[in-house]
Amino acid sequence: MLNRAPTIVREIMSRDCYRVTGNMSITTLAKGLALHRLPGVPVVDDHDQLIGFISEQDVLGKLLQSAYLNDEAPLVKELMRNEVLSVSPTKSITDLAQEMLGQKPKVYPVTEQGRLCGIVTRRDVLTAILRMRHT
């Protein structure tokens, strides 16, 4: 097989991706985000259906407030965004790169029929574009 540059999201996405459920505390979420070095993660139900997205920015203020007040940290489902930008695994990398310009998310859940099958990051797309230029 030729060593060609990837052209679609399926070729660059992380399949074994960190994901959370709505019933997780934001304290546990924050630890996971730090461990996996991600700015945000998909939220799924028990069947891996994408139901939301939550980022460091979404939880930072609430986590600080709960630490300061020594309160119980809220759950992911209380802070997650329900409107999620996701991408198909067959989407062109160059089309996704165009969508990622500006203030779009740095992490996109990759879904097939609403089910989470991976994530793709801006860094993944950047690396793929560099490979396209040098192949």
Image (cartoon, rainbow, N blue to C red):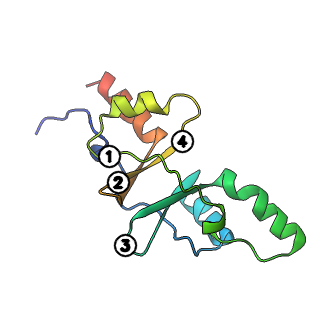
Can the viewer see residue 38?
Answer: no
Give the amino acid type for the residue marked by disc 4 in the picture.
Answer: Pro
How far apart are the two marked residues, 4 and 2, measured between alpha carbons? 16 Å
Earlier residue among tags 4 and 2: 4
Q: Quadrant of the C terminus?
A: top left
Residue at horizontal 37 percent and vertical 73 percent from the top: 47
Q: Decide: few, some or many residues near mark 3? Use Cα within 10 Å; few <14, some 14-19, many ≥20.
A: few
Earlier residue among tags 4 and 1: 1
Residue at horizontal 65 percent and vertical 66 percent from the top: 78
Expressed as whole percent of the image width and height from the top left, the position of residue 85 reads: 47, 46
Task: Check disc 1 and report the residue beneath it.
Answer: 88
Looking at the picture, does residue 133 appear above or below residue 12? above
**Mark 3 and mark 1 in contact (Cβ < 8 Å)?**
no
- Considering the numbered disc 3 on the image, is that residue within a helix, a strand or a loop? loop
**Mark 1 and mark 4 in contact (Cβ < 8 Å)?**
no
How far apart are the two marked residues, 4 and 3, measured between alpha carbons? 24 Å
- Considering the numbered disc 1 on the image, is that residue within a helix, a strand or a loop? loop
Residue at horizontal 35 percent and vertical 58 percent from the top: 114
**Mark 2 and mark 4 in contact (Cβ < 8 Å)?**
no
Specify the quadrant of the image occupied by residue 24: bottom right
Task: Check disc 2 and report the residue beneath it.
Answer: 111
Q: Which of 14 and 98 is in front in this view?
A: 98
Task: Check disc 3 and report the residue beneath it.
Answer: 47
Q: Residue 105 carries which label?
A: 4
Give the amino acid type for the residue marked by disc 2 in the picture.
Answer: Thr
Give the amino acid type for the residue marked by disc 1 in the picture.
Answer: Ser
Residue at horizontal 65 percent and vertical 54 percent from the top: 56
Can the viewer see residue 54?
Answer: yes
